Image: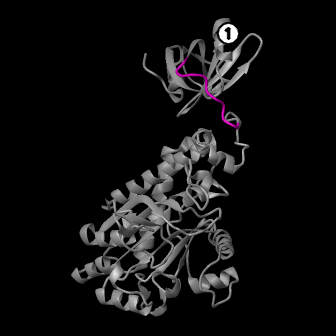
């Protein structure tokens, strides 16, 4: 008999079916027992009245893997309006050792460190699993939106010969006796691939050896990177980002509606045109000094409130960051060279995306590196490509975990990361 998932049971009323999953909970009453079985799609209620079957169920701790054969019977008070009656129950493995928290409760009461220490079982909780389903749907929407616009997915090296952002915050490793680094981003490679396909994207891990111990930083996270050629300036990039976010949220609604409901979320709308303010104006709105070189988290929160109150938007572009705070490959604003054709996108008062227009002329790269006192040699393989003709281009990168955390209202990005890697955690 073919296995049926719990989500499909309402279509099989009256039929004898086989389900399989984990013992989510047992409620043992005097004359009847209720066995709740969990699979990847939800919960199924099994009603046990036979004394022998009831005795077998009594011996099955939560999280034991079982198979149940029974009749699908309508019951308006049961999950999904049906339950299994007249069952036989067969364990598919030994009795499970219960985890150090109750997965059947509506919320996990264990501390986050305890959950992370026991991630393989904590992730089984419907709320933790729901966040990961939303992440998967968001990535699917990211890919589908860009595929429909003739972007090509690329896969670039994660071991590189030099740091991407001209900084020291890289993980060093031994590459057959030579120093190498884990890639901080696919920035250099996605730019070079514009010279091949014009429009590219990548979904992959990036690594930051920054000793942050905050609720918004990880040492390894998933970056959704985009680069496109033949742009007029950064505003063309911002338009693609707007459409990409809309596509991601639409796919979350379509593909992960159950997870959205489990978490009680209302998905944000993406305005047809996301409001934008220049960095200098952002400082004024946030009440920051006019000579502040960057936005602090408190400034971002103030700007998020302003965008919501003034424009009814959960999203806000801040453009024209000072060139001193942008990587060397950033294109300056031709009208105001001290400021960049770069931007950040804030989502509910938190920086979510960094992007902008890049330099595309070889001479400009040499000048930019010289101005910062950077040698050309570590970047020769990257910079030399611009001698062979590159179009005006730009791109952006979305931090997946940060996006999902903000979307679901998590207070810590680790709550939506399956196996986070940070300053303190290398296991499980």
Q: Considering only vertical position in the picture, is 49 above or below 132?
A: above
Q: Is residue 96 magenta?
A: yes
Callout 1 crowding tier (Cα within 10 Å): few <14, some 14–19, many ≥20: some
Applied colour scheme = one colour
The residue at the point 63 percent across, 46 percent down is 117
Secondary structure of the residue carrying tag 1 is loop
Identify the residue at horizontal 29%, vertical 69% (top origin).
Answer: 193
Residue 328: image location, x then y, percent: 43, 83
Position of 329 compared to 48: left or right? Answer: left
**Taking the image as drawn, is residue 264 in sight?**
no
Relative to 368, say whether 230 is above or below. above
Residue 266 x/y as whole percent: 62, 52
Which residue is most to the right?
30
Residue furthest out toward the left: 388
Q: Is 407 drawn above or below residue 319 in the view shown?
A: above
- Picture coordinates of residue 332 (x, y %)? 43, 87
Rendered residue at 43%/15% (across/down): 1
Asked whether the viewer can see residue 147, the reply is yes
Residue 65 left/right relative to 330:
right
User: Is residue 340 found left or right of 384 in the rendered image?
Assistant: right
Q: In terms of secondary structure, what is the magenta stretch mainly?
A: loop
Dividing the picture into quadrants, the one containing residue 372 is bottom left
In the image, which residues are magenta? 91-101
Asked which quadrant contains residue 147, the reply is bottom left
């Amino acid at each position: 008999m073919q296995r049926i998932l719990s989500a499909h049971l309402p279509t099989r009323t009256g039929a004898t079916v086989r389900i399989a999953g984990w013992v989510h909970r047992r409620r043992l009453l005097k004359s009847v027992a209720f066995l709740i079985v969990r699979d990847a799609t939800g919960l199924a209620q099994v009603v046990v009245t036979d004394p022998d079957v009831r005795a077998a169920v009594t011996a099955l701790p939560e999280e034991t893997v079982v198979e149940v054969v029974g009749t699908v019977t309508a019951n308006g008070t049961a999950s999904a309006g049906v339950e299994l009656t007249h069952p036989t129950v067969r364990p598919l493995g030994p009795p499970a050792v219960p985890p150090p928290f109750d997965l059947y409760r509506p919320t996990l009461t264990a501390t986050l460190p305890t959950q992370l220490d026991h991630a393989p079982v904590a992730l089984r909780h419907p709320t933790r699993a729901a966040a990961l389903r939303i992440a998967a749907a968001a990535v699917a929407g990211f890919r589908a939106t860009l595929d429909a616009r003739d972007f090509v997915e690329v896969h670039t090296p994660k071991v590189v010969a030099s740091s991407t952002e001209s900084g020291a915050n890289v993980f060093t490793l031994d590459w057959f006796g030579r120093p190498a680094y884990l890639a901080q981003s696919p920035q250099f490679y996605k730019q070079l691939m514009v010279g091949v396909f014009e429009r590219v994207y990548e979904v992959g891990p990036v690594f930051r050896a920054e000793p942050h111990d905050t609720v918004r930083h990880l040492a390894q996270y998933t970056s959704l990177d985009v680069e496109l050629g033949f742009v007029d300036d950064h505003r063309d990039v911002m338009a693609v980002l707007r459409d990409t976010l809309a596509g991601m949220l639409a796919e979350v609604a379509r593909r992960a509606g159950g997870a959205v409901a489990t978490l009680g979320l209302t998905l944000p709308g993406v305005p047809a045109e996301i409001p934008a303010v220049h960095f200098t104006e952002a400082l004024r709105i946030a009440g920051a000094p006019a000579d502040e070189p960057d936005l602090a988290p408190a400034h971002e929160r103030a700007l998020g409130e302003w965008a919501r109150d003034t424009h009814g938007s959960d999203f806000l572009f801040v453009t024209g960051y000072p060139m001193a705070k942008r990587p060397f490959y950033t294109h300056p604003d031709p009208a105001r060279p001290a400021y960049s054709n770069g931007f950040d996108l804030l989502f509910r008062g938190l920086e979510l995306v960094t992007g902008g227009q890049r330099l595309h002329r070889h001479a400009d790269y040499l000048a930019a590196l010289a101005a910062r006192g950077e040698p050309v040699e570590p970047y020769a393989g990257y910079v030399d490509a611009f001698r062979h003709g590159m179009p005006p281009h730009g791109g952006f990168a979305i931090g997946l975990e940060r996006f999902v955390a903000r979307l679901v209202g998590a207070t810590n990005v680790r709550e939506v990361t399956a196996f986070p890697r940070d300053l303190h955690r290398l296991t499980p």
